[in-house]
Image: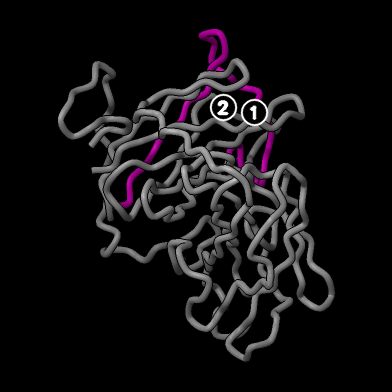
Amino acid sequence: MPVGAMPSTSTSTSMSASASVPASAMPSMDGMGAMTSGDGLSATRNGYTLSSATTRLPAAKAFGYRFTIVGPDRRPITGFAVDQTKRLHFYAIRSDLTGFQHVHPTMAADGTWTAPLAALSAGTWRLVATFTPDSGSGKDTDFVLSRTVTVPGKAVDTALPAASTRTTVDGYTVTLTGDLTAGMVHPLTVTVARGGTPVTDLQPYLDSYAHLTAFHQGDGAFAHLHPTATVTAGHGGPTLSFHAELTRPGDWRLFLQFQTAGTLHTAAVTVHVS
């Protein structure tokens, strides 16, 4: 089904057909060629655990969330492969899919990571770590693990915006093109414009010209939509291509991060997957 379309309605936006491949017909791979393990709904997978003693975070206050990645030998691991210029990516997302943060923690010699989170609003948050061990039984496997935490106070949920093919942020218009079906690997095209003019001055960000992640409405499953090409020149745009594998039907909230003139922009848009 075309990006942004709902099953019982039609859209006036013309969407090009996209080739797709059943996810079961090919291994799930990340942008570096590693096997992907998990949808981010568990703290433990294949003997690896996202471990933290913290279950509550302070409201309206920046906080350094401390955690370790414990291996099958029950000891914190310290060796991680580099993926998109980082050894570990860390995300915070509220249960209503608002408040998205994507940060890059620092690791101490003993394997303890500290994620610098900006102030969080009251409610339940899922904290997601993605990483690839560089040795052991999990070598070359891209793990996606998470824990949930509570921020005290009166939580007020925000309704998820309707599915769409377009969104705007900081004066930029982001348009999505592609057909998305659950359990299939699809190409997804993103174009960026400003004032009706195609943007061609996208700066490198995490070894690409944009970073795209998604969370499923309902269970909060995580997906990283991998770019099909890395940076080859100083500037990029207006068209960006991704491999999209969204495992569940329903609505997903996509977060596209791109950089221009030294400023990082985060565009959010809801897409419907049939």
Kindly indicate the quadrant of the structure image that contains residue 17: top left
Q: Residue furthest right?
A: 109
Kind of element beneath mark 2 = loop
Characterize the local packing of mark 1: few (<14), some (14-19) or many (20 or more) Cα atoms within 10 angstroms: many
Dot 1 corresponds to which residue? 202
Relative to residue 45, is residue 94 depicted above or below? Answer: above
Relative to residue 249, is residue 254 depicted above or below? Answer: above
Instruction: Please provide the residue range marked out in magenta.
Output: 184-210
Query: What's the residue at 52%, 42% (across, down)?
Result: 212
Dot 2 corresponds to which residue? 237
Question: Mark 2 vs mark 1: which is more N-terminal?
Answer: 1
Characterize the local packing of mark 2: few (<14), some (14-19) or many (20 or more) Cα atoms within 10 angstroms: some
Q: From the top left corner, tell me how far across and down residue 242 is, in percent.
A: 45, 42
Q: Amino acid at mark 2?
A: Gly
Q: Quadrant of the C terminus?
A: top left
How many numbered circles does the render carry? Answer: 2
Q: From the top left corner, tell me how far across and down residue 128 is, in percent.
A: 57, 59
Query: What's the residue at 53%, 24% (across, down)?
Result: 238
User: Given contact means CB atoms under 8 Å apart, are the residues at marks 2 and 1 in contact?
Assistant: yes
User: Is residue 195 part of the magenta span, yes or no?
Assistant: yes
User: Is residue 181 part of the magenta span, yes or no?
Assistant: no
Q: Quadrant of the N terminus?
A: top left
Q: Is residue 197 left or right of residue 251?
A: right
